[in-house]
Amino acid sequence: MAYLSLAKIRRRKKRDGASYWLLPLLLVVLFIAILLSLGIGGVSIPPLASAGHFLSYLGLTHSDLQPQEILILEAVRLPRTALGLAIGMALGLSGAVMQSLFRNPLADPGLIGVSSGAALAVVCVIVLGDSLFASFLEATSSYSLPLAAFAGSLATTALVYNLARRQGATDVAVMLLMGIAVNAIVGSFIGLLTYIADDSELRSLTFWSMGSLSGAGEATWPSIGIMLFASLLLLRLSGPLNLFLLGETEAKHLGVATEGIKRQAALAAACATGAAVAAAGMIGFIGLIAPHLARLIGGADNRFVLPAAALIGALLIILADTIARIVVLPAELPIGLVTSFIGGPFFFALLFREFRKRRA
């Protein structure tokens, strides 16, 4: 038995050492997906022509694209691809951090109220905006929904975090339970506001809740900036989160400032996910799928899992957006529906896998 355990440890170390070579491979796959995404749509643009066009700005090649193709590429597809990359990285990283923090393979950023808080704020603005938030709508214009979503996500996360604090310490298990309770309460308010909404408001709520990258542009630049900054903060947590996997008490004995790590993880994940929801609406399952795929191909070391989850999350969003744009041409399918079609079966497979592990 001791020999088998030692052999398993050696195999795991060998696999974890080799897993870092997978990151450049993921980058190459993501780059190919980006080129395909830029070229596929109602107007097809060859991937090499798209790459050549952007290289022409560096004086390396000559662009052969027509003016209409350049307009579509630069004004429509490039902004939504950039937004998709930021959202995928933010959601993938947030999910990986939450799963390590809670030591729960089914955890995602929505468990601490980020998505539900953003949804409640947006529903309030859409349904009650003309009567209660007229000055806010007038002052913020096209930024009203993103600002409301971001503020709602931060407020709900702060509420859950403070409810879980006892005597200066935060219990992650209590925070998880508080998040579930707050999500239920927030969901009831969303249901009430949806009930009193009129037809046009219901239509707006429905399309926002399904998620879309079609609003990419100048209005989403602040959200992209927040997602990138929060993602950098989350990447820095890979080392301490490895020790968290041993247990919070053990991590504290090893010198980890556990309270600071929990606070930074919750705040950064809330900012990243809140900005993603603010920019594109509700996009589910990315924060759940990307970390599991990262662990499946490269092991459990968060120094690999976090950057790999960011790249896989970005790849999944780019692929989902490409599918959403072409499956019902000339219309566009909400990206949230595509990620749900992918994430639902994956979630079932994950549950069955966990059940088999517990029986074994």
Image (tube, rainbow, N blue to C red):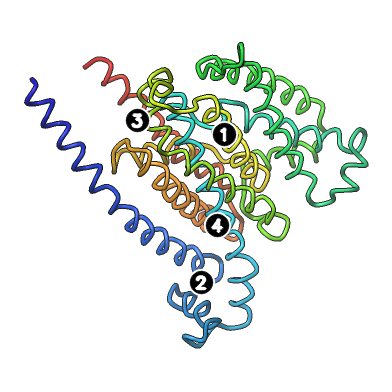
Residue 275: name its quadrant: top right
Marks 3/4: CA–CA distance: 27 Å
The quadrant the N terminus occupies is top left
Q: Is residue 42 above or below residue 284?
A: below
Q: Amino acid at mark 1?
A: Gln
Q: Which mark lies nearer to you, 4 or 1?
A: 1
> Is there a contact, CB below 8 Å, between mark 1 and mark 2?
no
User: Label 2: how many residues lie within 10 Å, few (<14), some (14-19) or many (20+)?
Assistant: few
Marks 2/4: CA–CA distance: 12 Å
Q: Which mark lies nearer to you, 2 or 3?
A: 3
Q: Amino acid at mark 2?
A: Ser
Q: Nearer the viewer, residue 170 or 339?
A: 170
| The furthest residue to the top | 167
Q: Is residue 322 above or below residue 17?
A: below
What residue does disc 4 label? Answer: 325
Left or right of 18, for residue 6:
left
Q: Is residue 118 above or below residue 18?
A: above
Q: Position of residue 153 (x, y in %)?
A: 67, 33
Marks 3/1: CA–CA distance: 32 Å
Marks 1/2: CA–CA distance: 44 Å
The quadrant the C terminus occupies is top left
User: Label 4: how many residues lie within 10 Å, few (<14), some (14-19) or many (20+)?
Assistant: many
Residue 264: give its label: 1
Q: Secondary structure at mark 3?
A: helix
Badge 2 or badge 4: first in the primary sequence? 2
Marks 4/1: CA–CA distance: 36 Å
Badge 1 or badge 2: first in the primary sequence? 2
Q: Secondary structure at mark 1?
A: helix
Q: Secondary structure at mark 2?
A: loop
What residue does disc 2 label? Answer: 44
